[in-house]
Image (tube, grey):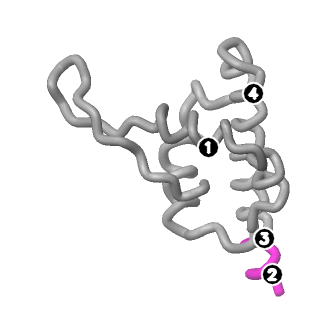
Amino acid sequence: MKGIKPERITDPNGKKIDDYWKPSQKILGEMKFLESLQTFDKDNIPAATIKVIRDKYIPNPEFVPEKIKSASSAAEGLCKWVRAMEQYDRYELTFIIKD
């Protein structure tokens, strides 16, 4: 959602994969992280970002707040936020089409 690039790492099978853990830790540690979520420009989320959210995360049965909560209450909140941004985009698009 915030356009942060992953690190490329080698998984245990020798395959190169995208790893978001270290970049995520850096963002989560920023003093104004919560403020950045509150002031996030939800009206201008890139179409490519929404496509990834809709194709990869929303249909994933593991990407639901109830399941994520068991790992981390902070991650649960972020999951809710991502889902809310996706719903907002869907609603905004519906509103624009109807007008």
Is the residue 68 above or below the residue 79 in the image?
A: above
Q: Secondary structure at mark 3?
A: helix
| Residue type, label 4 | Ala
Q: In whole angstroms, how far apart are the C-alphas of marks 1 and 3?
A: 27 Å
| Residue type, label 1 | Ile
Over which residues does the magenta segment extend? 93-99
The quarter of the image holding the N terminus is bottom right
The crowd level at tag 1 (other Cα within 10 Å; few <14, some 14-19, many 20+) is: few
The crowd level at tag 2 (other Cα within 10 Å; few <14, some 14-19, many 20+) is: few
Marks 1,3: beta carbons within 8 A: no
Mark identifier at residue 74: 4
The quarter of the image holding the C terminus is bottom right
Marks 4,2: beta carbons within 8 A: no
Q: Residue 78, how many percent across, how many down?
A: 72, 37
Mark identifier at residue 38: none
State the residue position of label 2.
Answer: 98
Q: Nearer the viewer, mark 3 or mark 4?
A: 4
